[in-house]
Image (cartoon, coloured by chain):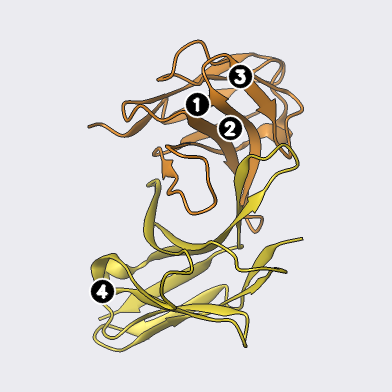
């Protein structure tokens, strides 16, 4: 079964330093992968998605992720953290339900803390 | 466009009460779904719809009903609320229903069942 594993439940960085949020996937074929962000008491917003067109995917707010098939990873990075990046981040894979419906399977989330 | 809207934002129910969580989208999306978010478990699919008049069960459908009479609306009904249904509920919609499709989420409804 397809799944994603987020390797860190919490990541703490200082403002202006790089961000790395780690995600490994399990899939027997090329998956569709996403990163979503959830700010406190807010809904889920798409940061970026991998659809096999390019292994390096650029998203909103300076985030990017690299799909590495050899490592089954899809880590999220940002060169310089901003206070407004503090939120929960979810790595997500699209899975074909038995009826054909494309459902999203979420990782357990990584809470990013940014200190001044 | 308002995108995906959900009401109410917060709700407290007593065990056994019923209620309807509302979800609407103005993007003319055919595909809509309901997820629940519980601590440490990510989001799980409750019910989904692939168009007006067509709904089906997801991973955790027990205790919930849905209907889809219009393209825009996809309400979720709790028939007899239980404490195990305390959760944050998200509605989502998408256009094509393929694996690469972006799903748009509403702001969520935080439900507490006492």
The residue under label 1 is B11
Q: Position of residue B84 (x, y in %)?
A: 73, 35
* Residue pictured at 75% horizontal, 42% vertical: A98
Same chain letter for marks 3 and 4? no
Circles 3 and 1, Cβ within 8 Å, touching? The answer is: no
Circles 3 and 2, Cβ within 8 Å, touching? The answer is: no
Same chain letter for marks 2 and 1? yes
Label drawn at residue B54: 3
Q: Colour of chain B?
A: orange
* Inter-mark Cα distance, 2 to 4: 36 Å
Say whether disc 2 or disc 1 marks the residue closer to the N-terminus: 1
Q: Is residue B72 left or right of residue A7?
A: left
The residue under label 4 is A62
- Foreground mark, 3 or 2, reads 3
Q: Chain letter of disc 2?
A: B
From this view, report whether residue B99 is shown above or below residue A57: above
- Foreground mark, 1 or 4, reads 4
10 Å crowding of disc 1: few (<14), some (14-19), many (20+): some
* Inter-mark Cα distance, 2 to 1: 6 Å
Q: Is residue A115 visible?
A: yes
The residue under label 2 is B112
* Inter-mark Cα distance, 3 to 2: 29 Å
* Residue pictured at 55% horizontal, 33% vertical: B33
Q: Position of residue B114 (x, y in %)?
A: 66, 28
- Place residue A105 in its image quadrant: bottom right
- Foreground mark, 3 or 1, reads 3
Q: Position of residue B54 (x, y in %)?
A: 61, 19
Q: Colour of chain A?
A: yellow
* Inter-mark Cα distance, 1 to 4: 36 Å
Q: Chain letter of disc 3?
A: B
Circles 2 and 1, Cβ within 8 Å, touching? The answer is: yes
Q: Chain letter of disc 4?
A: A
């Amino acid at each position: 079964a397809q799944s994603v594993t987020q390797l860190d439940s919490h990541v703490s960085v200082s403002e202006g330093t790089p961000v790395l949020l780690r995600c490994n996937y399990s899939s027997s074929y090329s998956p569709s992968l996403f990163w979503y962000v959830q700010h406190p008491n807010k809904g889920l917003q798409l940061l970026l998605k991998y659809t096999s067109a390019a292994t390096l995917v650029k998203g909103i707010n300076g985030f990017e992720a690299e799909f590495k098939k050899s490592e089954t990873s899809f880590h999220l990075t940002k060169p310089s953290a901003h206070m407004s990046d503090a939120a929960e981040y979810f790595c997500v894979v699209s899975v074909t339900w038995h009826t054909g419906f494309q459902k999203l399977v979420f990782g357990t989330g990584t809470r990013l803390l940014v200190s001044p | 466009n308002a995108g995906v809207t959900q009401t109410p934002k917060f709700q407290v129910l007593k065990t056994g009460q019923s209620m309807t969580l509302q979800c609407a989208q103005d993007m003319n999306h055919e595909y809509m779904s309901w997820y629940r978010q519980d601590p440490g478990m990510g989001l799980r699919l409750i019910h989904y719809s692939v168009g007006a008049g067509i709904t089906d069960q997801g991973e955790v459908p027990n205790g919930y009903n849905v209907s889809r009479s219009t393209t825009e609306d996809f309400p979720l009904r709790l028939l007899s609320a239980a404490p195990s249904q305390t959760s944050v509920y998200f509605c989502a919609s998408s256009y094509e229903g393929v694996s690469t499709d972006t799903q748009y989420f509403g702001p969520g409804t935080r439900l507490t069942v006492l």
